[in-house]
Image (tube, helix red, strand yellow):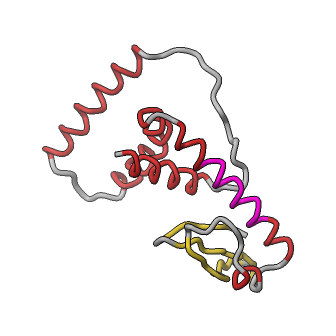
């Protein structure tokens, strides 16, 4: 079971295979502000899926608390690799790019690269601390945290 935040809701998505094809269906959704499992949600889930959702909600709460404590700049930097990947994918699907936007992006990337190189130092990185949350969901929480701090 996957849990996806979209449009102020968390969707519980069940994946199954039919004739060798993967089919995903939204089983139930609930308000993304909830931090416990509502009865109408648990009624649609198996006991194993309820355990998965409990773990997901607990990890999301931990991530949200951790992000509240972090400085805005750190959160922005941690979200940047994923955002750059999304931007890379977007550019690959474009037929053309406005020259002014191209120049602005190139200039910003050059300035960022210089600042990044001058700030380089070795540190321990927190890798995959949140196992139940899909990578996209961690990014969404980071972006929500950035949005609330700006």
Q: Which residues are magenta?
A: 52-63
Nearest to the observer: residue 90 or residue 27: 27
Residue at horizontal 45 percent and vertical 51 percent from the top: 143
Residue 32 versus residue 30 in the image, above or below = above
In the displayed orientation, state which residue is furthest to the right. Answer: 47
Residue at horizontal 73 percent and vertical 82 percent from the top: 39
Q: Is residue 135 left or right of residue 75?
A: right
Nearest to the observer: residue 113 or residue 144: 144
Nearest to the observer: residue 90 or residue 2: 2
Residue at horizontal 14 percent and vertical 45 percent from the top: 99
Q: Is residue 39 left or right of residue 142?
A: right
From the top left corner, tell me how far across and down residue 113 is, in percent: 36, 24
From the top left corner, tell me how far across and down residue 130 is, in percent: 69, 47
From the top left corner, tell me how far across and down residue 45 is, in percent: 77, 80
Question: Exactly how many numbered labels are in the figure?
Answer: 0
Main SS, magenta region, reads: helix
Q: Is-magenta flag for residue 58?
A: yes
On the image, which quarter does residue 144 sit in?
A: bottom left
From the top left corner, tell me how far across and down residue 134 is, in percent: 64, 56
Residue at horizontal 70 percent and vertical 68 percent from the top: 36
Q: Is residue 86 left or right of residue 96?
A: right
Residue 66 versus residue 60 in the image, above or below = above
Q: Is-magenta flag for residue 140?
A: no
Nearest to the observer: residue 71 or residue 13: 71
């Amino acid at each position: 079971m996957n849990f996806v935040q979209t449009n102020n809701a968390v969707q519980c998505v069940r994946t199954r295979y039919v004739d060798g094809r993967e089919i995903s269906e939204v089983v139930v959704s609930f308000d993304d502000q909830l931090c416990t499992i509502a009865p109408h949600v648990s009624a649609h889930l198996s006991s194993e899926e309820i355990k998965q959702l409990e773990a997901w909600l607990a990890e999301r709460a931990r991530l949200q608390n951790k992000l509240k404590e972090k400085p805005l700049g750190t959160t922005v930097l941690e979200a940047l690799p994923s955002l750059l990947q999304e931007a890379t994918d977007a550019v690959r699907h474009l037929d053309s790019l406005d020259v002014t936007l191209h120049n602005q992006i190139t200039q910003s990337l050059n300035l960022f690269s210089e600042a990044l190189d001058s700030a380089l130092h070795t540190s321990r990185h927190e890798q995959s601390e949140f196992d139940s949350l899909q990578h996209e969901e961690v990014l969404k929480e980071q972006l929500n945290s950035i949005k609330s701090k700006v």
